[in-house]
Image (spheres, grey):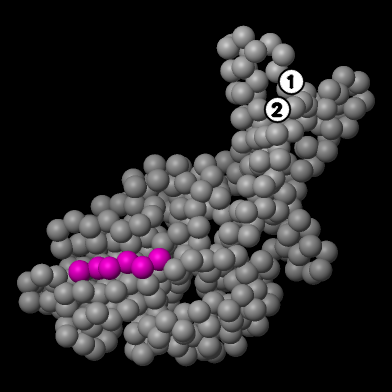
């Protein structure tokens, strides 16, 4: 409910400023024209939320088309808001500097062209993930894992925008790397109700020397956990649902979203205890860049989005060497990356290392909602494991 309320407030505020910008830029003075413009922006402000709820109620060509159009518009509206802000700042700045001949319409047109060009790039960028190489040094790394590679795919968000064909292309790129392991850290699906079984065949194409491993994220919960896991069960992907496994001398722990109340809920945790200097390293797969303990004291969405625990206390207690996460998309669209960085205390993206513990948070492969990436890029992460000197 908090998320919906904040989203509604942001959308209404954004579209109100866009209405003011359009009135000023077009020079609308007639009351009827202004009223018509205000009504249009009011409808646009509510369109994405309406489409989101409609498509969850019934997926059909009409609701799917409405969802896609409204998602594209929502992305554009964010960039148009930045255009409006830039135009007003430039106009007022020029007037303060004594350039009284500055034309608001000319400035608006120039900023609008730049904004549309940036939006076009953002739409393209959202569907072209790059490769991000990350080298990690681990204590007591077995010889069997030295200089080996692990590919991370996070937040693929298979659905109406990121389709089965896109998953096939992604699998081809991953397989071409010949990785020793592939890990998928949640939000494989985007929350669509129908059509999930159609993703099983392209997911079967993924392969790695020691296998492909998956942990659930919040969108698997939204789509229906059983429904999501049934699709994965039709592939060769192994689901790690609160358990520890050993793979060629390396411990791999997978924790399902939203976490566990205590280590007693983790099958095979005795492999990790008591952690000591001679223990092999443990790699943790967990969707959010937070501690894996979730005791239910906070509402799940509140703890996920607004008050995340970035102490990683239980992970460290269990001797985790490297935590691999996603979830944040690094904000996905500028300037939300500033917000995710603040909320997650800087752990929203990249590799962070301290004594005996490291975490890497991926910006993800796909997108949620608006199919746009500005201020960040999607990525396929390629870890190379090295022995600590």
- Residue beneath the point at 65% across and 74% down: 163
Q: Compute the Cα span from label 2 to label 1.
A: 6 Å
Outermost residue, left direction? Answer: 277
* In the displayed structure image, the side of residue 220 where residue 288 appears, left or right: left
In the picture of the structure, the residue carrying the numbered disc 1 is: 103
On the question of residue 292 being in view, the answer is no
In the picture of the structure, the residue carrying the numbered disc 2 is: 107
Image location of residue 106, percent across then percent down: 75, 27
Image location of residue 43, percent across then percent down: 79, 42
Instruction: Name the magenta segment's main secondary structure.
Output: strand
* Mark 1, other Cα within 10 Å: few <14 / some 14–19 / many ≥20: few
Assess whether mark 1 and mark 2 are in contact (beta carbons under 8 angstroms): yes
Image quarter in which the C terminus is found: bottom left
* In the displayed structure image, the side of residue 224 where residue 141 appears, left or right: left
* In the displayed structure image, the side of residue 268 where residue 65 appears, left or right: right
Region of the chain picked out in magenta, as a range = 132-137
On the question of residue 110 being in view, the answer is yes
With respect to residue 185, does 248 lie above or below? below
Q: Is residue 134 magenta?
A: yes
- Residue beneath the point at 21% across and 87% down: 144
Front residue (pair 217, 125)? 125
With respect to residue 326, does 200 lie above or below? below
* In the displayed structure image, the side of residue 321 where residue 215 appears, left or right: right
Image location of residue 377, percent across then percent down: 50, 57
Residue 200 lies in quadrant: bottom right
Image location of residue 143, percent across then percent down: 17, 85
Front residue (pair 56, 121)? 121
């Amino acid at each position: 409910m908090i998320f919906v309320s904040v989203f509604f407030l942001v959308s209404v505020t954004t579209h109100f400023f866009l209405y003011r910008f359009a009135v000023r830029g077009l020079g609308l003075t007639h009351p009827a024209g202004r009223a018509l413009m205000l009504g249009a922006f009011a409808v646009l402000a509510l369109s994405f939320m309406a489409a989101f709820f409609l498509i969850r109620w019934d997926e059909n060509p009409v609701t799917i088309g409405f969802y896609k159009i409204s998602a594209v518009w929502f992305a554009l509206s964010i960039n148009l808001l930045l255009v409006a802000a830039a135009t007003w700042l430039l106009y007022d700045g020029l007037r303060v500097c004594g350039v009284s001949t500055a034309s608001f319409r000319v400035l608006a047109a120039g900023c609008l062209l730049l904004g549309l060009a940036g939006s076009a790039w953002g739409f393209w960028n959202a569907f072209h993930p790059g490769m991000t190489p990350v080298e990690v040094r681990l204590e007591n790394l077995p010889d069997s894992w030295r200089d080996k590679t692990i590919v991370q795919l996070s937040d693929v968000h298979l659905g109406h925008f990121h389709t089965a064909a896109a998953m096939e292309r992604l699998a081809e790129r991953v397989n071409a790397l010949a990785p020793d392991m592939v890990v998928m850290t949640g939000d494989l699906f985007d929350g669509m109700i129908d059509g999930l079984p159609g993703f099983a065949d392209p997911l079967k194409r993924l392969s790695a020397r020691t296998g492909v491993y998956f942990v659930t994220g919040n969108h698997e919960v939204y789509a229906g956990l059983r429904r999501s896991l049934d699709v994965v069960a039709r592939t060769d992907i192994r689901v790690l649902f609160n358990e520890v496994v050993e793979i060629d001398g390396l411990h791999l722990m997978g924790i399902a979203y939203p976490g566990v109340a205590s280590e007693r809920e983790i099958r095979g945790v005795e492999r990790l205890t008591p952690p000591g200097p001679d223990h092999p390293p443990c790699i943790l797969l967990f969707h959010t860049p937070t501690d894996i303990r979730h005791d239910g004291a906070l509402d799940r969405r509140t703890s996920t989005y607004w008050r995340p625990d970035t102490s990683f206390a239980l992970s460290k207690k269990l001797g985790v060497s490297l935590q691999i996460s996603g979830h944040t998309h690094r904000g996905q669209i500028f300037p939300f990356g500033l917000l995710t960085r603040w909320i997650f205390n800087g752990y929203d993206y990249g590799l962070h290392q301290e004594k005996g513990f490291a975490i890497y948070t991926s910006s993800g492969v796909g997108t949620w909602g608006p199919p746009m990436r500005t201020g960040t890029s999607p990525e396929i992460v390629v870890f190379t494991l090295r022995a600590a000197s």
